[in-house]
Amino acid sequence: MTTTELFSPTEPDYLSQLTSAAARYADRTERRERNREVLRTRGVLHADEPERVEKRLARLGADWSLATAIEREPSDPVAAAGSTLRLPPESFGSDLLGLERLIGRNNLTPVAFLEEGALVSRSVGRVTINGPGGGHGTGFMVSPSLLLTNNHVLRSQEEARRSVVAFSLQAGIDGRPLTPSVFQLEPHRFFVTDRELDFSLVAVADRGARGEALSSFGRLTLSEAQGTVVVGEFVNIIQHPRGEPKQLALRENQIVDILDRFTHYESDTREGSSGSPVFNDQWEVVALHHSAVPKTDAEGRPLSVDGVPWTPDMGDDRLAWKANEGVRISRVLRALREITLTGAAARLRDEVFVPRTAAAGPAPAPVEGAPPPAAPAPSGNGAAARPGPDGSRAFVADGTAHLTIPLRISVGLDPSVFPVASVTAPPPGPVPVAPPPAGRPDTASAAERDVDAALVNHRLARERPYYDRPADTAAREAYYAGVATDDGDALRRALTELLTRTHGPRPRYKPMRLVYPWVDLHRDGRLRSIYSGNDFSAEEFIRADAAVEAARTARIQELFLHEGTAGPAEFEAEFDALEASMPFNCEHVVPQSWFLKKEPMRGDLHHLFACEVGCNSFRGNFPYFDFPHFDEAVRDACGLRESNGFEPQEGKGTVARATLYFLLRYPKQVGDTAREFPEDRLPLLLSWHASEPVTEYELHRNAAIAELQGNRNPLIDHPEWAEKIDFSGVWP
């Protein structure tokens, strides 16, 4: 038996929770109104924190360039004609539909959205408290045994002991009510509650009143991952309002504010909806609905619909409310993770954090008159993980590749180092790999999606003005307003602070989605190798980059299956060899080895350029150098190289300005070892900068990057500052 109650007897009751919700809502009035104004004038991409928006886009498989391109498209077909490219959604898959839906440019959604909603709804039930102080609430299964609801629904173990949960309490497709499946709660096995975050987690009996299996109703996988929802997004709530049959508030619920622990949204939930799951459009749980935000009087007391102070004896239906508040699910999980539990209780708690796989063994025999067993329960976004014919399973959830073999081993990978793939360890003889869960495509389809999105980016980009000089001039003047230039050291420090502060969002390294489709294009719409000057189509680079990713993932699978002892060094060696086998690459003018491939340096667009693999390899990680007498230097189409450095054939001014930007943005990051760029070679960069003036290509790059990651390159905007800036403070 485990009972953990994270409160003292003097903690607030439900009335105080309502008052607290109202106070939080009132305290955020200014921020909420700002959010609404930004949503009205600029849209969803700009209302929330840039980092959260970036993570949301990444979770949707999109990026800023694609999102902003769609955002700029006129929603009126007449206005769109002859102005910007409007591609039919079916031409590039459902991912773009999801992105257009987020931005508000498209209300279409695949029919699978409803099917997934029907699947996840099976895990939601009505909680009924019998006896004194009884009532109704909503709860949902979050593990094979545990149900999540509000603390004010189940305040104590004693209340939970007298309570039941009913699933399938709803109308069927013919409009007639289904026979609900009722399960007793078992707080003697597990009960945890937290009044401050207003949640209770309780065990449910394995069998219902008529012998139904609890497992047939599945569970919802909860995730602490960021990027599940942003301000301005619409959410969905499955609920039992006032104890009535299950209902759905569908996409009429807009997130208007996100606090540290709570989120506010406008919706049509009613009393009895307490404990309902709040979903995003991918059917991931983002919040636990817990309170209406009531209208209050001057003293902060909740008001009834009659305008008088509300008291609990009036009933929830007399409460006057103006918004709703949910507890962020990541905060519930954090609190749950921090509880000290042992034995069986700890094992039950830990199951909440394990993504759902298909249940092992045959389904239980149906009980006469009971609802049919559910389809496999959702994994992350409602998609089921299906077993292979041999019982082996594979799925990916929240950056972890899960391999289920007779030993049931789960292997976690750091997604910043290794791409994650679905893999299955086969038994002797040929075994087909289980298909990936719906909504979580396999490696091939993911690569195809990346290519499709990148090509859409490129096609949209070709319809845009290549470089809008008046607009960029105005943006440049606004960006540097107030930067003083009369002292070299102060100028350097001011620029470093400005570049860092405005560097948001910070896209991770993925050149096929950002660099090749738009940022690195020349006016003719083609890419040019930064060192050789050879030109190529953007599609060549995009497809080659996708091939590298696919090959990397395939090699990971092979290493897992046949070389189980391989470690990070072996993986890195394999990846380097794979990249070297491809014709194209993305060049970091400041080599990745100098900053250990860390973000945001690795993905900083200002120093990323299209390049052939041969030139990239020829340069290696040698610092730039001038060879006035090159008789003994090794010559290549890409430039000259010797043990002390590399001199490019083309692009000296461009790479000099990109390197100088890096030194300003990331001071003291390079130059601390002999093979890195030493301070005594600063005159070389300044010389290349002076001898090759800024080109329109660089102006275009600078404006495009500023649009994507917020900051600019001062050496492109103000070439004259190169002689004024005191760079001495950028070296260790």
Image: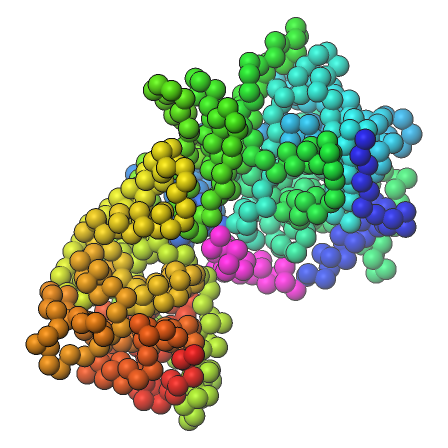
Q: From this viewpoint, which residue is outermost toward the left? A: 631
Q: Quadrant of residue 474?
A: bottom left
Q: Main secondary structure of the magenta part?
A: helix
Residue 635 in percent (x, y) is at: 10, 68
Residue at image point 48% right, 20% down: 391
Q: Is residue 7 left or right of residue 231?
A: right
Number of marks in the rendered image: 0
Asked if one can make out residue 478 in the rendered structure from this viewpoint, the answer is no
Compared with 682, 129 (above or below) is above
* Residue at horizontal 45 percent and vertical 34 percent from the top: 439
**Residue 696, percent from left and from top:** 23, 72
In x, y percent, where is residue 712? 38, 72
Looking at the rendering, which quadrant does residue 84 occupy? bottom left
Q: Tell me the quarter of the picture where residue 124 sits.
A: top right
Q: Relative to 120, say whether 528 is above or below.
A: below
Which part of the image, by quadrant, shows the N terminus? Answer: top right
Residue range highlighted in magenta: 30-55
Identify which residue, 694 or 94, lies in the foreground.
Answer: 694
Quarter of the rendering occupied by the C terminus:
bottom left
Residue 201 located within the stretch drawn in magenta: no
Residue for point 35% across, 51% down: 572
Q: Nearer the viewer, residue 259 or 478?
A: 259
- Per the image, is 54 magenta? yes
Please report the residue visible at 11 percent of the width from the left and 65 percent of the height from the top: 636
Q: Is residue 588 visible?
A: yes
